Image (cartoon, rainbow, N blue to C red):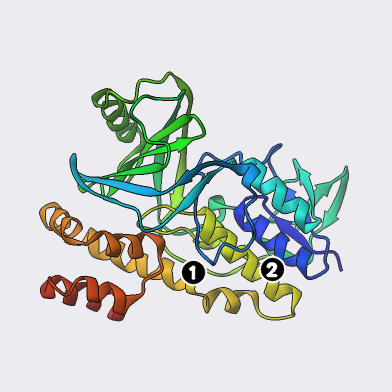
Amino acid sequence: MQLYVVGAGPAGAGAAYALGRAGFRPIVLEAQERLAAKPCGKGIPLLRDVPFPIPKEVVLNEIKYVATWLDGEPLFKYGGEEGYIVDKADLLEHVFAEAGAEVSFGSKYNVRSGTARVNGEVVEVKAGVFAGGFAYYDGERIPVVQYLLKGPLKDVSYETIEVHFDTEIMGYYYVFPHGEDVEVGVGGFAKPQRLWAMLDKFVERDARLRGSVIAKESSAVSVGGVRLGYVRGLPKAGEAAGYVMPLTGEGNRPAAVSGYLAGKALAEGRDPLEAQRRSPITRGVELQRRLLEWTKSMEVRERREVIASLPPEVHAEIALGTFRIPYMLAKLISRPGLMLKVALKLLRG
């Protein structure tokens, strides 16, 4: 039986890679005419759960540090975790080639009929993985807007990603290297028009960000947590199933892991939804979602105090979704009140 993957993003790449390793030659249906058409971050933390190798030739920047600010004030600079900024289109192309997958561009999957057009012919998509992205997600989403600035920019560190927390909108500004250029954006619980105005002020205040604008981009990010299910019998994976870290918006790694798990289970005759449901990445997304709900319930002042009180190591555990809870609580031992609150939210919801 021919297996299909709907969507050629990170989740589709993960699914195709798993199917290819199992001896299948999947056809990947991509509605757009190119890879990586959706504007989004290009960062991938170097954790063991990344399901496919990342070749050096697609790496634009090696990240060694995370620098953070809180409502305009410096918070900390942390070097405990590393990652890459990648050329996302080149990475996806590499993964599909390694999988032996055929990518059919301009092949929009028809949800009503369960068909798609491949090489001029209408085919029935009977089996595979659905990785159609955020358009098929029915949970909570927030807007993100960004500029790509022409670089190199003086005094911007190209081995550091910057996170500027804004407690009022429960989001953050970010400054990410992108080769010699720089991505600067903001996402949070506010309307896009307000975010664009906020981003313009942020860039205006920072003398380093004087590059000319190459691109102006906006998108939506799914932050409502995991929502597993099927689309016409195809198991959902990636952002279509909510595999985005709700507090940080990190999506490339969770989506790729989700797609890989679904594809591997499908190839082995197991339940793809159960394979995703029982995985550590699902736990990470769900625990972040609990903390997001907790954050929403706070007053701005309390929100600021909690963020400021968390040690860098705990910030990293939360941001990456690894949640080694004994390790986190040990790092909070000097703040027993906060330690108890965090423990209750993580362990009891």
For label 2, the residue is 263
For label 1, the residue is 281
> Given the image, on which type of amino acid does mark 1 rest?
Ile
Quadrant location of the N terminus in the rendered image = bottom right
Residue 237 visible, this orientation: no
Q: Residue at x 28, y 65 (%)?
A: 314
Q: Residue at x 35, y 20 (%)?
A: 210
Q: Secondary structure at mark 1?
A: helix
Task: Describe residue 44's horizontal placement relative to residue 331 as left or right.
Answer: right
- The residue closer to the viewer here, 219 or 51, is 51
Q: Residue at x 45, y 49 (%)?
A: 221
Q: What's the distance in space between the residues labelled 2 and 1, CA to CA?
A: 15 Å
Q: Is residue 80 above or below residue 149?
A: below
Looking at the image, is mark 2 or mark 1 earlier in the sequence?
A: 2
Residue 72 quadrant: top left
> Given the image, on which type of amino acid does mark 2 rest?
Gly
Task: Describe residue 224's horizontal placement relative to residue 107 as left or right.
Answer: left
Residue 328 visible, this orientation: yes
Q: Is residue 283 above or below residue 29?
A: below
Q: Secondary structure at mark 2?
A: helix
Label 2, residues with CA under 10 Å away: few <14, some 14-19, many ≥20: many
